[in-house]
Amino acid sequence: MSNIIGLKELRENVENYVSEIKRGKSFIVLRRSLPVFKISPPDEDAELWEQVADFTKIKKGGVEIKNLLSRL
């Protein structure tokens, strides 16, 4: 697999690319022959991410943003 792929190719084979990314590979995605974004595995710093709030504990399926903002 090349590390330059088209957006259509990514959409059609997303599971294959997810597997490759999990193995540490990165990809530059092109749209109409222009680079639009890069997909890469998370850094080692990803372990520093912490859960701030889980709104599914308040209501199954989460909370609508307009309801949350209206209470702030």
Image (spheres, rainbow, N blue to C red):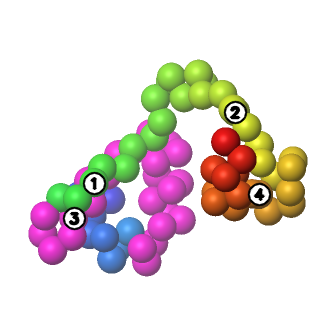
Pointers 3 and 4 in contact (C-beta within 8 Å): no
SS at circle 4: loop
SS at circle 1: strand
- Between the C-alphas of marks 3 and 4, the distance is 34 Å
Three-letter residue code for mark 1: Phe
- Between the C-alphas of marks 3 and 2, the distance is 33 Å
Please give the residue where the numbered disc 4 appears in the rendered image. Answer: 62
Pointers 1 and 4 in contact (C-beta within 8 Å): no
- Between the C-alphas of marks 1 and 4, the distance is 29 Å
Please give the residue where the numbered disc 2 appears in the rendered image. Answer: 51
Please give the residue where the numbered disc 1 appears in the rendered image. Answer: 37
Q: Nearer the viewer, mark 2 or mark 1?
A: 2
Residue 68's place in the image compared with 30, above or below, is above
Image: magenta residue range = 11-34
Q: Earlier in the sequence, mark 2 or mark 4?
A: 2
Please give the residue where the numbered disc 3 appears in the rendered image. Answer: 30
Three-letter residue code for mark 3: Leu
Q: Earlier in the sequence, mark 3 or mark 4?
A: 3
